[in-house]
Image (cartoon, grey):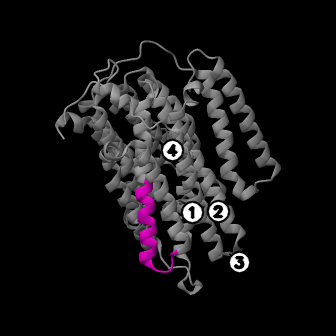
Amino acid sequence: MSRSGFGIIGPPVLFIGVFQLLETMLSPALPLIQRELSASPGEIAWIFTGGLISSAISTPISGRLADMYDKRTVLLILMAITSAGALISGLAPNVQVLIAGQAVQGVWLGVLPLTVGLFRDTLEPEQGATGNGLVIGTAALASAIGLILSGPLIAALGYRSLFFLTLGGALVAAIWAWIAVPATARAAGGRVDWPGGLLLGGGIALLMLGLTTSSSWGWTDPAALALFAAAALTLSLWAFVELRSREPLVDLRLLAGRSSAGVTAMGFVFGFASFGLLVALPMMLSLPEGTGYGMGADTLWIGLYMFPLGVAGTVIAPLVGPMTRLLGRRTVLVLGAVLVSVGTAMLAFLHGSPWEIVAGVTVTGLGGGIGLTAVLNVVAADVPGERAAGVSGVVFVAKSIGGTFGAQVGAMVLAGGSVAGIPAESSFVSTYLLSALLGLLAVAAAFVIPGAVRYAEAAREGSANAPKPAAF
């Protein structure tokens, strides 16, 4: 890869990697944060909830801004805002300021859809597919490494070091982007649909708040039902406004197309399946061996068991482009979904030894890496250039909502099958089988997506809409 191609792909990949690493490492630090900041369990939960809601709201807006303006400028602005959030979190004197810092920092997720549009505008289609693979692979590897590094790093340097080390990596990525990422052409015109953004943000915030609090309140609690009803009403109003807007934040007519609808559904399903797994497996691994299905693993060993999930995704994601040329993209999409189903089904029936667990985790990681990379490649290939980042943002929001929903459902299944506070083996099996079933639903969604690679074909024919290539 030459300097120019490396300079385009490298900065956003590094930035995404360091913040995904922080997100993974922060979870084991929560007990320490609670003690040092004298925070209540509810306040600690908001450290993640605030960032999750912020990401869900800001991602589609960031995608629309990236579709309208110079993507380099939008990228640098997002990097600056996110870095400020990390600094606020690292210096936070109390949990309220830490929650605010995490909410500001949650904007980082907007860099993910922006990269789809950036790679499309500046790289050849096959090179952009490689870049998308590196984004997904790096995020997967960062998640795996974070599970291993978190304990030793927190013990040696304290939890605040997580934010400052992340800030250092983010500043390196920002300087690199300032130097190496080229400017892109602005759209011919357009504006940000702020009313649509406020309604979408409010609806998503209400939905995410309902999902994250339902485990403690109960799914049928009047307050939880009120949140879900308010979310449905707000999102319905948003859809009405968007359909009447000349320049909507999210083009629902475009989103109803086969490609956009298919990738959004697959994003939701992959989020649901993976987060359900991430709730259940660490809990099962931590149970005593005397239960007959636990491994008695501590935090470090849980990280080692989960490590193949990230490594498999890292290795396979950059190869999705060549696989697509060889097998066709629908086959690759189906393959990713099938491997997620197979891997989680393996965990349901084969979890009696470390090697069985590692095998199931590895297969699941391969499926997730293939599926998510292929989804991004479909967006880059089929969605009009001025909407690619926006649609990618919707996909990632769908994945976040699916992940939150999956985590809550997984926790509910485990709690429902608990005896004396310990989930029964059957409840873990049920959680894994639910993830496997959802993988099969992703197969159905893959068949909604057209098999032809429209954009790549246009580029080969010399279409005026083809991206301006950068040399590798």
Q: Give the mark, 3 or 4, whose residue is nearer the N terminus.
A: 3
Q: Residues within 10 Å of mark 3 (few under 14, many from 20)?
A: few
* Disc 3 secondary structure class: strand
Q: Residue under circle 1? A: 279
Magenta stretch: give its range: 350-368
Foreground residue among 388 and 152: 388
Indicate the quadrant where residue 198 lies.
Answer: top right
Identified at 75% across, 33% down, the residue is 233
Q: Name the residue under label 4.
A: 446
Q: Residues within 10 Å of mark 2 (few under 14, many from 20)?
A: some
Tell us which disc is closer to us: 3 or 4.
4
Q: Quadrant of the N terminus?
A: top left
Task: Tell me the residue that label 2 is attached to.
Answer: 411
In magenta segment, residue 103: no
Position of 253 relative to 48 (above/below): above
Cα distance in 3D space between marks 3 and 4: 39 Å
For marks 4 and 1 on the same chain, the one whose residue lies earlier in the sequence = 1
State the residue in front, 230 or 463. Answer: 463
